[in-house]
Image (cartoon, rainbow, N blue to C red):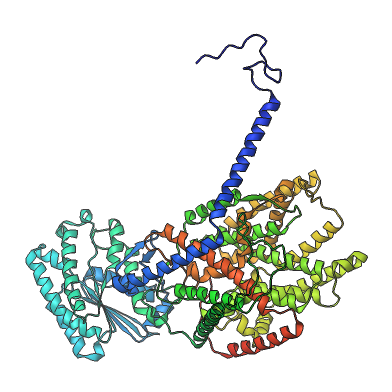
Amino acid sequence: MEEEAVPHGAEQADGAPRGAPPPLHRTAACCHGGAKMAVLAYSLGKREINQHFTIKNAKLISLVVVLLLLVFHTASRYYGGGDSCEWLLSRGRYLGENVWQPYGCMMHKYKSIEAKTCLAEKRVAFIGDSRIRQLFYSFVKIIDPERKEDGNKHEDISFEEQSSSVKVDFLWYPEANNSMKERLISWTREASLKPDVVILGAATWSIKLHGGSSKTLQQYKVNLTAIAVHLERLADHGEVYWVLQDPVNEEALSENRKMITNQQLELYNEAAVDVLNSSKRSGRSRIKLLAASRQAALETITKSDDGLHLPESTRNVGAMVLMNSVCNKLLRPIDGSCCQTLPPPNILQKLSACFFLCSALIFLVLHILGNNRHRRPVPPDVESLEEKKPATAAVPFGPKAPFQALCKMGVIMGYFYLCDRADVFMKEQKFYTHSTFFIPLIYIFVLGVFYSENSKETKSLNREQTDEWKGWMQLVILIYHISGASAFIPVYMHVRVLVAAYLFQTGYGHFSFFWLKGDFGLYRVCQVLFRLNFLVLVLCVVMDRPYQFYYFVPLVTFWFVIIYTTLAMWPQILQKKANNSGMWHLGVLAKLLGLLLLISFFAFSQGFFESIFSVWPISKLFELNGSIHEWWFRWKLDRFAVIHGMLFAFIYLVLQKRQVLSEGKGETLFSAKISNLLLLLSVVSFITYSIWASSCKTKTECNEMHPYISVVQILAFILIRNIPGYARSIYSSFFAWFGKISLELFICQYHIWLAADTKGILVLIPGNPSLNIMVSTFIFVCVAHEVSLITNDLAQVVIPKDSMALLKRLLAVGLCSLVVLLLPRGSQPTPGA
């Protein structure tokens, strides 16, 4: 289309000829207007999302989802067969090349000492052909990894472990015939020879010797029917497993084995299942069918050397499945949920259930009586999904409010118990790949950028920024835990820095508060301790776990007490006092130096450290499985992080008071030269640390250096985040929202996002890992947020401002704690890294 001619002299309003390019200032104005429209659309889009998807609606949705899932899993177990032993033996999939995942439960990887403990004084018999002999060797190598496959072919082989009196035999019976039956009959007649566990299977020789004839198949079925009678008798006082035939790689078979086809093997498997399940249908059968190794072999048989015998990795799957089926119910490994029976609730768990039930009944009575006096509802902030502070003073709590909070807590604890102590939901083991860690990491950081907001203040490490910092760190740690990334040392070392940064913030935050406010009162201390420990103490009772199991809370609680003691002891030095004389600054540094020397003394005197923390009743707080080694490891790993945070807070607040820093809107923190130099050094330190972490050979080697160098990365992040003025003026409300509930997220993940006390993953939606993670994460976050609100509400009720009333309650709590500490506790698992 031709351009329209411009009449001579025709001009635009600004004096430019019509049709000429607009002047630069108009172009800039147009672009500026477009940018404004984009920002407006962006803000309206977020507001629209937040207006309809409030946290209250999210919690209602999560409650409905939990109820539906509870009905679904209960019904599927009742009608579809909910025996985890059957899942272990029959179904599964590969997570990686050699990692087998049974359907719906976790398979423990048994070590030699565990296998010896389980099988002590027992006799195990493998009966069958060369493929059963393979299974025998794999089973024996779990007990004795040094065992060689040196037995003669087509002969019986014996293995005995002297220290534990474990005896495992392989008996050569390649066909299910009268010879095999006679051996079984001899065991039923002579009790002293009867094995505790019998594993048998046969078919390939029958196919090979008789050319796969249908007559042989019928005879196989008759023989197996006769054998099943004696297997049932052996199962009366032991365990009997029939191994279904694994597939073959027909192309790789030798000429004398070509008649052993997968079609033939399937016919023999169908015959075995039909015979053995007929007894099961009559209610008599206790013979277990091992089909998991067959399913594993379907994916790996192409790697077989001769087309018939399985690769070693696949044989190991079958052996480990057998070991889990035999031993899980005896040793009860926390990461072996298959074939485990539920322990009955202990006395404390029963009392906690009664307590929450009574609270619910009292709340119901008060609600019916119309006692609705409670604090005025607070309108939600649709931008941040947080509660705004009311403009007027809140109405004090009425008697109904605390019981309502306890009622909610009881429902939440019920969900915790169902997820990780009841046999309702499924569990799976973790498996690390780079994609399972880094792809979710990219997702959350994109979301974090999308929810960027202007900060209310531009001071360094302001409240919005520290919440943001805690939020993104917590999300990274959650992804690290669920992906099993501790197996990858570079990621492990970077996450160790994040944990140190949390403790750094503990030192920074509490020092700043005491230095500026000077509030060392008992009310303040009890408020902090209650908020830190309430959820963990409830979980210790409900989930039957020791306090040290939730290691991060004992760690931050310990360091809060140390910070309080250091600053509260004589002489108390506050900012007001230090402003009058610079000498008081030296007093603060002297206190910090004394604390540093004390920490160093404990760090290099493990025996003294253990003797202090092994004294009752302190030992009850810090022991795990009767040892304080876990507490020593956690304490030593980040022993300097808190004092680094305290020192940083002191230097920063002094510099801020002396107006050395430029913290105005848009201003760089220091002069241009100093700012650029510090930013360069920060980036170089990040790169150097990442290179060093990637070169680490073992965690032990790197952990030795970690306490000394983690502070460099923390300071580098603070400088990069705060030196540019524009960086201080914005923050991510997405990350900040998670930062406000970071402690609850860290603790709740143990049981309602992860499973088996962090060893596995909770499965709410079986068969769809991606959907399962989305649903379980949604519920988990809603629960953590509600627990945070409940904790804050109860803190106002439980911790009175009146000193005498507070002392009386502390005395009552002390007496109750003493009773609980005197109760014996069983063996406990060690939490994940």
Query: Where residue 824 sits in the image (x, y, percent)?
Result: 54, 89
Query: Where residue 398 sits in the image (x, y, percent)?
Result: 64, 77
**Quarter of the image holding residue 100?**
bottom left
Q: Is residue 486 visible?
A: no
- Residue reaching furthest right? 580
The residue sitting at 51% across, 54% down in the picture is: 440
Residue in front for this viewpoint, 165 or 480: 480
The residue sitting at 12% across, 72% down in the picture is: 221
- Residue reaching furthest left? 215
Judge whether 285 appears above or below 720 on screen. Answer: below
Judge whether 53 appears above or below 63 on screen. Answer: above
Q: Is residue 416 visible?
A: yes
Query: Where residue 335 sits in the image (x, y, percent)?
Result: 44, 73
Q: Is residue 459 left or right of residue 582?
A: left
Query: Where residue 431 sits in the image (x, y, percent)?
Result: 45, 62
**Quarter of the image holding residue 90?**
bottom left
**Quarter of the image holding residue 72?**
bottom left
Q: Is residue 573 left or right of residue 718?
A: right
Residue in front for this viewpoint, 406 or 455: 406
The C terminus: image quadrant: bottom right
Judge whether 765 appears above or below 157 on screen. Answer: above
Q: Is residue 528 left or right of residue 4?
A: right
Q: Is residue 240 left or right of residue 405?
A: left
- Residue reaching furthest top? 8
Q: How many marks?
A: 0
Residue in front for this viewpoint, 21 or 309: 21
